[in-house]
Amino acid sequence: MPARILIIEDEPSIADTLLYALATEGFSPHWCATGQAGIAALQSQAFDFVILDIGLPDGSGFEFCKQIRARSTVPILFLTARNGEIDRVVGLEIGGDDYLAKPFSPRELTARVKAILRRVSPTPALDQQATSQSPASSSGASSAAHLPWFSIDEARCLIRFRGLALELTRIEFRLCKTLISHPGRVFSREQLLDAAWDEPEASMDRTVDAHIKTLRAKLHAIDPAADPIKTHRGLGYSSRELP
Ligand code: CA
């Protein structure tokens, strides 16, 4: 059964775009133009996901999020016109699962929805759908099987994290690829130097730490809540094994 998605958004043009993009991806979207209408819809029908605009005519999306959270754990993705740190922190603190600033591309939106749905309730059907519709699948892309958050496009030296392309340097790409290709395996700094650098003997262990730091910052920019790279004190690094 397709996931039912409630869109609470007062701008018809944005709602239209969302309805079309989500229906195209096989979801079953439903639109409400006010917060009150959205709350009423949630009380009378079952939804698997809520897309919630922060600036609504009858109140703040944050307030409606609190009302929804009082009785439901349904995943909530905020939409906001303001690309501010405060919005993000407030939104996630009061129970939002993610946050997308306008303007966004429909593809970005559906990628976030899929990623969150996978995270909260992994289903084979959804994984299959996401894989078969991966834009990179026609160009020799391969997914890191145990890390559904990532996909590797070897031909383009591109790694996507939660559906979004990471802008990585050559070394960061190699580091990331090495870690996510073997989920849970701990790599020493020496092993990572060998895997990622052209002349490992000329580099130092601290160089690995510096590049892991910038890689983490880029992953963090896409998903502030996720920390897919784990530090093993005195040993090295690994990507996390996900359930
Ligand atoms: Ca609005």
Image: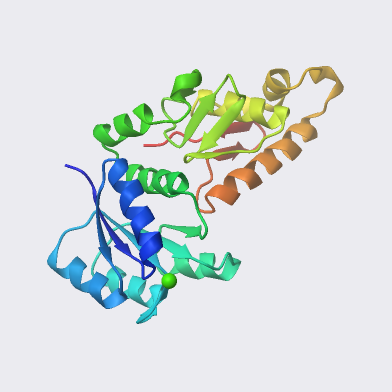
**Picture layout, residue 223 above or below residue 68:** above
Identity of the residue furthest to the bottom in this view: 58
Scheme by which the image is coloured: rainbow
Q: Position of residue 81 (x, y in %)?
A: 52, 67
Q: Where does the C terminus fall, quadrant-wise?
A: top left
The residue shown at (45%, 30%) is: 135
Q: Position of residue 138 (x, y in %)?
A: 45, 21
Query: Is residue 96 or residue 15 the one in the foreground?
Result: 15
Q: What residue sits 86% from the left and 21% below the top?
A: 202
Task: Tell me where residue 129 sits by quadrant.
Answer: top left
Residue 122, compared with residue 80, is above or below; it is above
Q: Nearer the viewer, residue 17 or 231?
A: 17
> Left or right: where does residue 102 sit relative to residue 125?
right
Report the residue that reaches farthest toward the front.
13
Give coordinates of residue 225: x percent, y percent: 50, 53
> Which residue is pictured at 68% across the width and 24% down the height?
192
* The quarter of the displayed image where residue 193 is located: top right
- Residue 233 location in percent, x, y? 64, 38
Is any atom of residue 54 visible in this view? no
> In front here: 179 or 4?
4
- Find ligand 1 in the image and state its quadrant: bottom left
Q: Seen from this angle, which residue lies furthest left?
A: 44
Q: Residue at x 60, y 50 (%)?
A: 221
Up/down of 186 relative to 43, above or below: above
Question: Going by the image, does 52 lie left or right of 230?
Answer: left
Q: Is residue 212 left or right of residue 130?
A: right
Quadrant location of the N terminus? top left
